Image: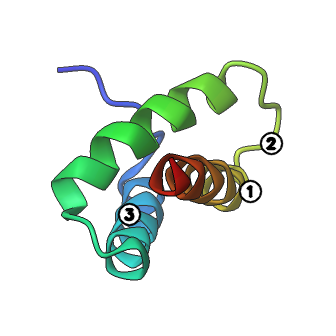
């Protein structure tokens, strides 16, 4: 099975980000994970440094979810 995470440590960072977003946005973690991983894959394509992907992914997803909530 293919994974989008480079290591177990990286997976743990992203899982923590998913859980935090789920809590913040009051949505199920499974729902957030689908959107988060889609955005992460998009950002990974052009990334040279992976260290800040979690932060960028959270920011983009948070903005998208807020826009959706407003409509």
Disc 1 target residue: 52
Q: Nearer the viewer, mark 1 or mark 2?
A: 1
Q: Residue at x 32, y 53 (%)?
A: 32
Residue 49's disc is 2
Q: Position of residue 40 (x, y in %)?
A: 54, 37
- Upstream in the sequence, badge 3 or badge 1? 3
Label 1 – label 2 distance at C-alpha = 7 Å
Q: Position of residue 17 (x, y in %)?
A: 46, 68
Disc 3, SS: helix
- Upstream in the sequence, badge 3 or badge 2? 3
Residue 28 occupies quadrant = bottom left
Label 3 – label 2 distance at C-alpha = 20 Å
Q: Position of residue 19 (x, y in %)?
A: 32, 72
Q: Position of residue 38 (x, y in %)?
A: 44, 30
Question: Badges 1 and 2: C-beta atoms under 8 Å apart?
Answer: yes
Q: Residue at x 40, y 72 (%)?
A: 25
Residue 18's disc is 3
């Amino acid at each position: 099975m293919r994974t989008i995470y480079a290591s177990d440590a990286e997976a743990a960072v992203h899982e923590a980000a998913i859980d935090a977003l789920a809590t913040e946005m009051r949505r199920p973690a499974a729902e957030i994970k689908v959107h988060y991983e889609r955005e992460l894959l998009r950002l990974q394509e052009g990334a040279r440094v992976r260290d800040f992907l979690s932060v960028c992914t959270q920011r983009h997803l948070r903005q998208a979810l807020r826009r959706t909530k407003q409509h």
